[in-house]
Image: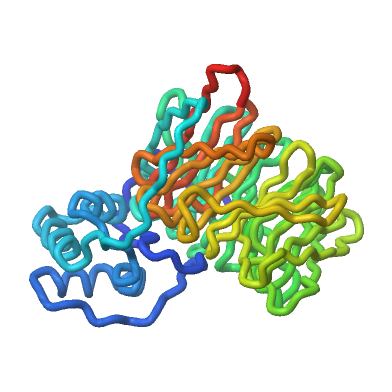
Amino acid sequence: MRKGSLLLLAVAAAFVATTMSMSVDVAGQRGPQVQLPEGPGKELVSTACTKCHALNFITNSFGFSRTEWTDLIGSMVALPPADRDAITGYLAQHFPEKADAPKAKIVPGPVQVTFREWQAPTLGQRPHDPLWTRDGKLWWTGQYASRLGNVDTKTGQTREYVLDTPNSGPHGIVEDAQGNVWYTGINVQEVGKVDPKTGVVTEYKLNNPDARGPHTPMFDKKGILFFTIQNGYVGRLNTANGDMKIVKSPSEPSYPYGIRVDSNNLLWYVDYRQPKLASVNADTMEIKEYTLPRADARPRRIGITADNMIWYADFPQGYIGRLDPKTGQFKEWVSPGGLQSRPYGMDTVGDILWYSESGVKPNTLVRFDPKTEAFQTWAIPSRGHVVRFIDATPDGNIVIAESGINRVAIAEVKNPTGTR
């Protein structure tokens, strides 16, 4: 443990991967190399872009306009104007927006939403998960720069905390009762804590050598930290004494992903390699699985409404779904953007479900009222570029991290009828 550096408005010329493709999100994952078309700018793209990601991030994308390519490159790295123009010109010519790119479907409704966005100071850090803390700050994990950051949404002042272990790949993020911010270091098999006042970083290595890729953290009602582990485990950490227990998922192969806790202190997670949800007993860590209705379902994030209904985002199939734990019954709805909408980040406010559509252009924020089964959608101003997680504030607003465009945002929610 040592004191982490506290940076104010630092800008690093680190060129890291944007989420131009919709592949499974594993930090540092590189796809196969591809052959780029000939043309001015090819060599710059080949040398600059491949320093941090494979070219399939470009070739597998739905393409972008020149303005969009310029915004994307500008959020990743500071380039001389001539190099920037050559790269964006090449990409716009050879990888324009495809005609079949799924378009956002804007569904009107009674709720008003206003977005405010901030760019993360360090370029290319790929903000992964957002967090609203009790002091009114919006935090994020800078996955590709091994740092956490926050912005005071009243003043716009930003701060970044460099983590002690390089290439730690901070992924999920959560706040404890004392105001400390916890994260999962997905690349280095650890869970960490940052004291926002001092910048001190404390790290806890996973105590099972077979468990790799700590993913999403969540505190239970008793203040015990639980976290999913992407190669098929679930962990529990008593932050008071450092005691850690890790258990294996019943399914094989398994990819425990998003996790939440219900009002009865039962933990729930989704399995991204199985068509399953699972509950975890906080005391015994006994895992009980529930099989989704469709064998091709692959849920990615999870939400729990005030009535303890379990909601999930079926990322590759374009559905949202609900499990009633009392009856074991499922119900599903196609997301407004259709089967290619790729619903992803998810949270709840009371009995209202909020989530993002990451497969449409631009990405959308979606509100779903289970009582009326009515959807309402909003286009994310900076297009989102894959919103992997969302977090609801106590007063019903929604915070998001826009990974590919290096921004975080708050969606301020107002309903003229007085209900959210």
Q: Where residue 387 appears, x then y in whole percent?
A: 47, 50
Is 419 situated above or below 282? above
Q: Classify residue 361 as left or right of residue 35.
A: right
Give the camera-side residue of 261 and 329.
Answer: 329
Q: Where residue 303 appears, x then y in whole percent?
A: 67, 47
The residue sitting at 31% across, 62% down in the picture is 100
Q: Where residue 137 appears, x then y in whole percent?
A: 53, 32
Quadrant placement of the C terminus: top right
Give the camera-side residue of 315 and 250.
Answer: 315
Quadrant placement of the N terminus: bottom right
Q: Classify residue 83 as left or right of residue 310.
A: left
The residue sitting at 56% across, 53% down in the picture is 334
The residue sitting at 58% across, 64% down in the picture is 186
Q: Where residue 147 appears, x then y in whole percent?
A: 49, 52
What colouring does the structure picture have? rainbow
The reply to whether residue 202 is in sight is no
Is 161 situated above or below 243? above
The residue sitting at 42% across, 75% down in the picture is 30
Give the camera-side residue of 147 and 323.
Answer: 323
User: How many marks can you see?
Assistant: 0
The reply to whether residue 418 is in sight is yes
Toward the right, the furthest residue is 284
